[in-house]
Amino acid sequence: MTNGNLGRGVWGWCLAACLSTAWAQGEAPPAARVPMVDVHTHFQAGGRQQNFAAALQTALSKMDELGIRQTVLMPPPLVHVAPNYYDIEHLRFAADQHPGRVAVMGGSSLNVMIHSTPAAEVTESVRARFRTRFQEIVSQGAVGIGEMGIHHVSIPAMGSQHAYESVPADHPLYLLLADLAAERGLPIDLHMDLVPETMPLPPTLRANPLNPDTLAENAEAFKRLLTHNPKARFVWSHVGFEPLLTRHPQRVRQWLQTYPNLFMSFRVNKGHPSPASALDPAGELKPAWQDLIRAFPDRFMIGSDAFYEAGGVARGSGDPGQDTGLRWLRALVDALPPDLARAVGHENAKRVYRLP
């Protein structure tokens, strides 16, 4: 057996052994673990801080259990003010109470402004309001801007009202956001389900009426956003487990080679045969993905997409009400070679988000 195959065999054994033993006994994986920074988490439901306080305790408990040293909380990419709306004002208490363990971001208000303003209607007055809101978010201690939504498909497992949203990545307000964030040195967290070319809606997504029958190509506008201001840094979330299965290793490699200001955060779950899934159906990291991490060790982070609530993890990269996505991420980091585990687990996040 070659060294590479040996490593992959050990990886698979470790993942299976750690998860089966730990999950069966209700325990965390072994203690000797690389610390992790989770750069993409949320609170479930609306802006009611008394509920968020309980959700914070859930988050801290899960962090202790899984060796997550720090988490970055952010609002989801909402497109209008609704009962589940919140922004950094509802999250900053968590960073105030637990500095060094919790950092916060803001941006749902900016996302609403972008999605409610057609590109042709972006006047100087609109730009001024956008700048003002950006400064308000920054003044409250944001370590980044997000989660911002460019293209977000509606997923049946999340319910029939799970949002569908789409706006051109080169919308004037997105270009302005790139300039503002670059000036402040803040990364922008992006949700963008990639459509390399116009395609029919995948059958797995047809149960939700909010999705269109045809998905329009969106890659070219995204390229224009990435090149608009090379000093702007973008974290493209949810690589490794996504509904359209379009970010396979070869395509990810091309994006990372072309755009040095682009980073990606892993969201994983027990795998899928598609090359776009980082884990295979047995739960092992696919060789092409480990090779890709090795080729770009400074460009990947972990971002679970966990939605914390008082009773546990409401949803994320796993079954609703379960923390399986967090555990698969823990196992992924544990199984990487030490240098890559440190980079993906926490070093890249600390550098990109300028965390203590």
Image: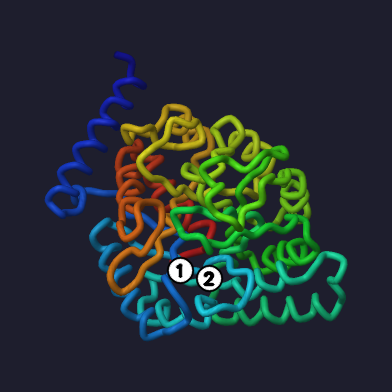
Q: Is residue 52 at least partly visible in the picture?
A: yes
Q: How many marks?
A: 2
Query: Closer to the camera, 343 or 322?
Result: 322
Query: If the image is split into quadrants, where does the N terminus sit?
Result: top left
Q: Which mark is residue 105?
A: 2
Q: Is residue 298 at least partly visible in the picture?
A: no
Q: Which mark is residue 73?
A: 1
For the residue marked with disc 1, what is the amino acid?
Answer: Leu
Q: Is residue 94 above or below residue 28?
A: below
Neighbour tally class for label 2: few under 14, some 14-19, many 20 plus, Cα within 10 Å: many
> Which residue: 42% across, 77% down?
95
Where residue 88 appears, x then y in whole percent? Answer: 53, 78
- Residues under labels 2 and 1: Cα distance? 6 Å
Where residue 236 appears, x then y in whole percent? Answer: 58, 51
101 to the left or right of 170: left
Query: Closer to the camera, 252 or 163?
Result: 163
> Which residue: 51% across, 45% down?
242
Query: If the image is split into quadrants, where does the C terminus sit?
Result: bottom left
Determine the image quadrant of residue 43.
Answer: bottom left
Determine the image quadrant of residue 119.
Answer: bottom right
Element on which disc 2 rests: loop
> Which residue: 87% across, 66% down?
120
Q: Is residue 119 above or below residue 207?
A: below
Query: Closer to the camera, 337 or 249?
Result: 249
Element on which disc 1 rests: strand
Label pair 2/1, CB-CB below 8 angstroms: yes
Neighbour tally class for label 1: few under 14, some 14-19, many 20 plus, Cα within 10 Å: many
Q: Earlier along the polypeptide chain: callout 2 or callout 1?
A: 1
> Which residue: 23% across, 31% down?
13
User: Hey, which residue is sitting farthest top in the picture?
Assistant: 1
Q: Is residue 7 above or below residue 235?
A: above
